[in-house]
Image (spheres, grey):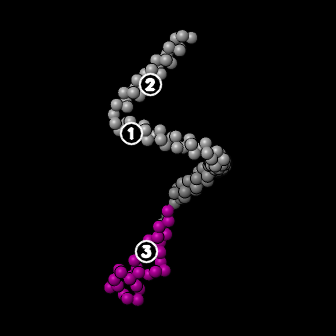
Amino acid sequence: MSGTSGFWKGILWGAIAGGTLSLLKKETRQSVLEGCKNASGNISQVMKNPGKVSGQLKTAASKLRSTVEDVVEDLSYIADKVEELKDVTPQVTEIFKETKEAFSKASTLPVVKYEKTVRKDPLSGPEAKPESLMEDEKTLQV
């Protein structure tokens, strides 16, 4: 047990020595003094008005509890939505497969092409130009 006690004594003496050395700088001393004044002012205010401080603590605790409940509720909602997505994903995958199959079947069907034939107009005679097309004659090629 004396080994443990010697360890903690060494830690304490090291902290005292470090704190003392750090107080050699003027800025550090002023900062420590200001911090001590603020702390003592806060402590005295708590001692004078313990009811006010306790009310503030209760209000803060209530807000914290409400926030935690909201977060738990939000996490529960998100977990429900994730489960729904797990259920819907296979259905969507099946729809994609069916659509892909439908398109692949459509691409294997024969393509129908229409070709217009140029025919001389019988009323014009042999000098008819090949640009005159008869719209009612179409050749279907498969």
Q: Amino acid at mark 1?
A: Gln
In the image, taking residue 76 as reference, residue 33 lies left or right, namely left
Badge 3 or badge 2: first in the primary sequence: 2
Residue 56: horizontal and vertical position, in percent? 62, 49
**Residue projecting furthest to the top:** 2
User: What residue appears at the point 61 percent right and 45 percent down from the top-left corner?
Assistant: 48
Quadrant location of the N terminus in the rendered image: top right
Q: Which residue is mark 1?
A: 30
**In the foreground, 47 or 142:** 47
In this view, the mark in front (2 or 1): 1
**In the foreground, 94 or 128:** 94
Up/down of 28 relative to 140, above or below:
above
Residue 9: horizontal and vertical position, in percent? 49, 17
Q: Is residue 37 visible?
A: yes
- Counting labels gives 3
Q: Gap in Å between the C-alphas at discs 2 and 1? A: 19 Å
Badge 2 or badge 1: first in the primary sequence: 2
Residue contact at pointers 1 and 3, CB within 8 angstroms: no
Q: Which residue is mark 3?
A: 116
Q: Secondary structure at mark 3?
A: strand
Up/down of 8 relative to 44, above or below:
above
Residue 31, by quadrant, is top left
Q: Secondary structure at mark 2?
A: helix
Residue 25 located within the stretch drawn in magenta: no
Residue 16: horizontal and vertical position, in percent? 43, 24
**In the foreground, 20 or 110:** 20
Up/down of 141 relative to 54, above or below:
below
**Residue projecting furthest to the bottom:** 123
Up/down of 25 relative to 46, above or below:
above
In this view, the mark in front (3 or 2): 2
